[in-house]
């Protein structure tokens, strides 16, 4: 069974930066697309950024130019570098991955942007 575990969340002031990490563990055959989603209180979960196994990326318009998704296939990890954070980025951030055609999601890590 494959599990995803996020880390790196926390409290940061507006304009600050954070880097989220997500590690896949267990019996891993092949991880294809990976992504970060987020869910703010009272709102639906939304896609923040995604990356293919080959490194192609796409971003939500709201984070373009501020967030960068990357991955290390040798370590089965995905990262999200978040710069110029805004209060509206406050949410629980979830790692998501396609493992052999099955979608997996982590438990989430809280990101709070506040002064």
Image (cartoon, rainbow, N blue to C red):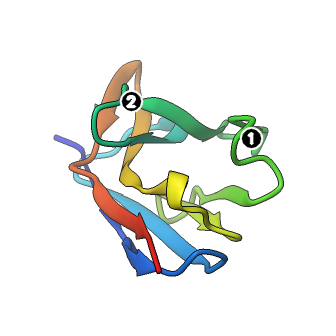
Residue at coordinates 47% horizontally, 81% vertically from top-left?
Answer: 115
**Snapshot quadrant of residue 50:** top right
Which residue is at the front of the view, 28 or 6?
6
Residue 33 visible (yes or no): no
Residue 29 location (% of width, % of height): 38, 39
Residue at coordinates 43% horizontally, 37% vertically from top-left?
Answer: 97
**Snapshot quadrant of residue 103:** top left
Looking at the image, residue 80 sits to the left or right of residue 44; the answer is right
| Farthest residue, direction front | 115
Residue 54 badge: 1
Looking at the image, residue 25 sits to the left or right of residue 59; the answer is left
At mark 1, the secondary structure is loop
Residue at coordinates 39% horizontally, 67% vertically from top-left?
Answer: 112
Label 1 vs 2, first from the N-terminus? 2
Marks 1 and 2 sit apart, C-alpha to C-alpha, by: 25 Å
Residue 3 location (% of width, % of height): 22, 48
Which residue is at the front of the view, 53 or 16?
16
User: According to the image, label 2 marks what residue?
Assistant: 45
């Amino acid at each position: 069974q494959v599990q995803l575990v996020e880390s790196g969340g926390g409290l940061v002031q507006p304009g600050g930066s954070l880097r989220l990490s997500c590690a896949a563990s267990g019996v891993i055959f092949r991880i294809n697309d990976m992504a970060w989603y987020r869910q703010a209180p009272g709102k639906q979960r939304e896609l923040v950024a995604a990356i293919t196994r080959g490194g192609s990326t796409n971003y939500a318009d709201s984070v373009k130019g501020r967030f960068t998704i990357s991955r290390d296939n040798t370590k089965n990890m995905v990262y999200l570098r978040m710069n110029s954070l805004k209060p509206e980025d406050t949410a629980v951030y979830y790692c998501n991955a396609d493992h052999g055609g099955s979608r997996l999601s982590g438990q989430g890590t809280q990101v709070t942007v506040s002064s």
